[in-house]
Each structure stands twice: as C-alpha cells, then as structure tokens.
Image: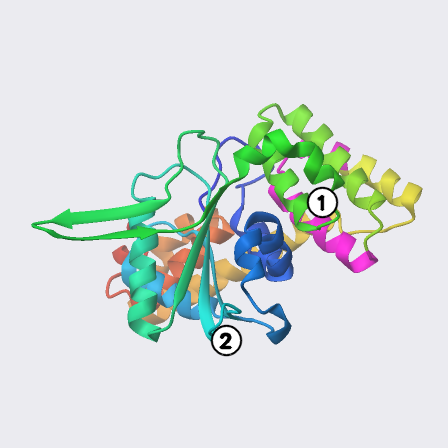
Amino acid sequence: MTQDSGQEGSGSTDHDSPWKEALEHYLEQAMVLLFSQLHERIDWSKGFLFRDGELQQVVREAESGRRYTDKLVEVYADDGEPTWILLHVEVQGEAEATFAERMFTYYYRLYDRYRRDIVSVAVLTDTSPSFRPESYRYERLRCGLHFWFPVVKLLDWQQRWSELEADPNPFACVVMAQLAAKGERDPHRRKDAKLKLTRLLLERGYSKDETRALIRIMDWIINLPEDLDAEYVAEAHRLEEEYKMPFVTSFERVGEQRGRQEQAVETLLRLIERKFGPEAKEASRPRVERAAVGELEMWFDRAIDAERVEDVFSTD
C-alpha cells in the first residue's frame, strides 16, 4: 500500500504497518465485512496460515518498484472441493494505471510457483471515485485472456457510516479510521474524528487486549501534526480515566516507531557494508537515516539480491 500525502503528521505516514497488523489480527472479520460472499465459501474452522514471506519473494521477482500492503494466506475452501487454496489480499492506497495488470502478474506467478487455486481480492483505500479496477484483459491475434477479481472501494463505505458505527465487527473500526484519515484534510477535524472513534471503541465493550490493539491500529492510521497529537494524547488519557480502560497511546507508539526505525537503519547499513563495502555504507548513510520504516524494509529486501548498491535505491 502506498503512502498518503494528504496527512501532515509528526513524521512520515506509515500506512503499511497498521493495515498489515489489522489483517493479521482480524483477517476473518475483515472478510466478513468486506467480502461476505467469499467469507462464506471458506472453512474457517480449519484455521489459516499466513505465507507473506513467500509472497514477498514473488513480488521481488515481479517488480523492483514501490512496496505495497499485501497478504498471502493459506485457507481451506468450502465449495464442494475441501482443499486448501491461496488467498491473496492486496490493499491499494492510490490510483495506479497498471494496478489490474500487477494483480494478474502476482496471480500467475503464484500459480506458477504453487500450482494451487489462487483467489485474489483488492481493497482500494484511495480517494479517487473513478479508480475501480476489477479486471485485466489482453488480446492479440485471436489469443487473449480475461482476469477479474473482487474489489472493495472503501470510499463507498462513507455513505454507510451509520452501519459501521452500529456494526460490532472490530474491523468496522479499522474502516472508519481509514475513511477519517483519507477524508479529513483539516488536521483539527482529523483529531476530532480520532477522538470520536477512540470514544466509540471504548463504548463497544471489547476486551482490554482487543481495545488496545484497535486503538494502536487506529493511532497509526490517523496521523496528526505534533501539536495536535499532543492534544489528542492528553484528551485520550482523560478517556482512559473515564472508561477505566488503559491503552497504548501516541506516546508509546512514537517510541516504538523510533525504535523500529533505528533498528532498521542499523540492519540495512550493516547489510550494505557486508555486500558492498564500508565506503558504500557511509555514502548510503544520510539517505538511509532519513528514510521511513517502510522504505527501509523495501531497500533491505532489494539489498539481499542486489548486485550493485545503486540497485538498492533504484526508483525504476
């Protein structure tokens, strides 16, 4: 998933981390809310297995460009052929002309590798009403193909806000947070929306652990400038006392983010030094130290296979 430039937060906006965490915590609930018909055709009683590491290998082979939020899950179909399939969930944060083609590329590479049935779905979190890719077509000299996939446009849920507020499904909170993050350009209104969602979460009566997890995800998604973030933290503390429900707030989140970034910087620079030498490490240091966690993770993946240090930072 790409970063959204519409939010002016206290640092680089990291949309990958909250969506990855949300899907890992609430995969079944996300499918219930967003892809209900598909959810009914999966036997959730048999469990599921994330295979994201294998998906990232496919992504690296398919492209060297930007990083996106995607999940690859081994699930069991319940459609008359009780066997495991691969569910590929792609979250796309901005309009992209080649998105449908990229979905097809991932599909055929996954099929070529595993020879298993692949089910691909897309969640579009962008703000462009006209961006609705649902299929990829190719035809030449009487030879062609048509690949289509289920798509959910979160922007459509803006008109169903009252349904989300009334839905006990915890993933409804994730959708509301995403809509608030993308829909409220004014940071003061975004802060008000964040506080309203925080109160709504506390009123739903979730367990302490689930409340903390959801507020952590929401806190990542709805980014605020430093001064408004401080105001949110102060008001959130008052909500903690009112509802007697302590949770991880922006103070802890900022510390965690800083720790993750510092660790990622050290790990990437160490890998560059081992592969390309100390001079390459020092030349790369200024750029690496300014990067967000998502970029650092992408560059680390590239550095593993790169033959030149220039390939690590390529934008081609």
* Residue pointed to by mark 2: 82
At horizontal 36% and vertical 54% (from top left) the residue drawn is: 284
**What amino acid is found at the position of numbered circle 1 in the picture?**
Ser
Depth order, front residue of 79/32: 79
At horizontal 82% and vertical 46% (from top left) the residue drawn is: 204
Is residue 143 depicted above or below 239 in this figure?
below
Residue 121 within the segment the image draws in magenta: no
Residue 226 within the segment the image draws in magenta: yes
At horizontal 73% and vertical 38% (from top left) the residue drawn is: 165
Question: How busy is the neighbourhood of tag 2: few (under 14 within 10 Å), some, or many (20 plus)?
Answer: few
Q: How is the image coloured?
A: rainbow
Depth order, front residue of 81/194: 81
Q: Position of residue 94 (x, y in %)?
A: 42, 38
* Residue pointed to by mark 1: 250
Quarter holding residue 299: bottom left
Residue extent of the magenta highlight:
207-232
Q: Is residue 124 among what the camera can see?
A: no
Q: CA distance from mark 1 to mark 2?
A: 44 Å
Q: Is residue 104 left or right of residue 141?
A: right
Q: Is residue 209 left or right of residue 89?
A: right
The disc, 1 or 2, on the residue closer to the chain's N-terminal end is 2
Depth order, front residue of 312/185: 185
